[in-house]
Amino acid sequence: MKDVGLLIARLIAGSLVAGHGAQKLFGWFEGPGWQTWTSLTESMMGMKPGRFWGTMQAAAEFGGGTLTALGFLNPLGPIGLIASMLAAAYKGHWGKPIWANKGGAELSVSFLATAVVVGTQRPGRYALDALLGVRLPRWLTVLTVLGSVGLLAETVRPTLTPRLFPVQDAPQSEQPPQSEQPPE
């Protein structure tokens, strides 16, 4: 039963997240497509450069979702989903009520939970890894986790925008500036 449960979880969560990534990368399923998505990543989420961060997010969703659904190269797919869903919950949904109809992280958190379960288990008997006899070396998993943590750390780091012009805190008085005169 565990293998059947893992298959169902992998197929549903992996396919849905891969489809979500395909919306962003290719414009499939009435999605925005790559150009629009990368622009939104920069303008609405403040992640600069948008082309880099938007591509990373969409690729993690599409690639990670596909690998997860297939049960191939486990746990690389779930690691991609975990990183992507953490970034989405923080950058896209933070501070909103949890439910998706209010802009919240309901779906991100649900996919995150599934990815954690699938990523901490072998993918099961009904997976490409089992069929092909694939077992990734531990160092590759550790390297992928460290890379994802590094990218996530950069994602959540506050973006500082230099001010090109000084900001006026209070309106200046109507009086002309007084010049300092040396004492007599």
Image (cartoon, rainbow, N blue to C red):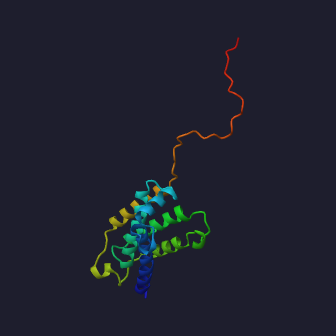
**In which image quadrant can residue 52 be found?**
bottom left
Image height of 72 relative to 155, above or below: below
**In which image quadrant can residue 140 be found?**
bottom left
Image height of 91 relative to 118, above or below: above
Is residue 103 found left or right of 60 in the rendered image?
Answer: right
Image height of 141 relative to 117, above or below: above
Q: Position of residue 160 (x, y in %)?
A: 52, 48
Name the residue located 58 percent from the left edge and 68 percent from the top edge.
103
Quarter of the image where the C terminus is located? top right
Count of numbered marks: 0
Q: Could you tell me if residue 42 is visible in this image?
A: yes
Q: Position of residue 104 (x, y in %)?
A: 58, 69
Q: Position of residue 138 (x, y in %)?
A: 34, 68
Determine the residue located farthest toward the top in the rendered image: 184
Name the residue located 43 percent from the left edge and 71 percent from the top edge.
23
Is residue 114 found left or right of 96 in the rendered image?
Answer: left
Quarter of the image where the N terminus is located? bottom left
Q: Could you tell me if residue 78 is visible in this image?
A: no
Determine the residue located farthest toward the bottom in the rendered image: 1
Q: Nearer the viewer, residue 10 or 27?
A: 27
Name the residue located 36 percent from the left edge and 62 percent from the top edge.
143
Q: Position of residue 168 (x, y in %)?
A: 63, 40
Name the residue located 39 percent from the left edge and 78 percent from the top edge.
69
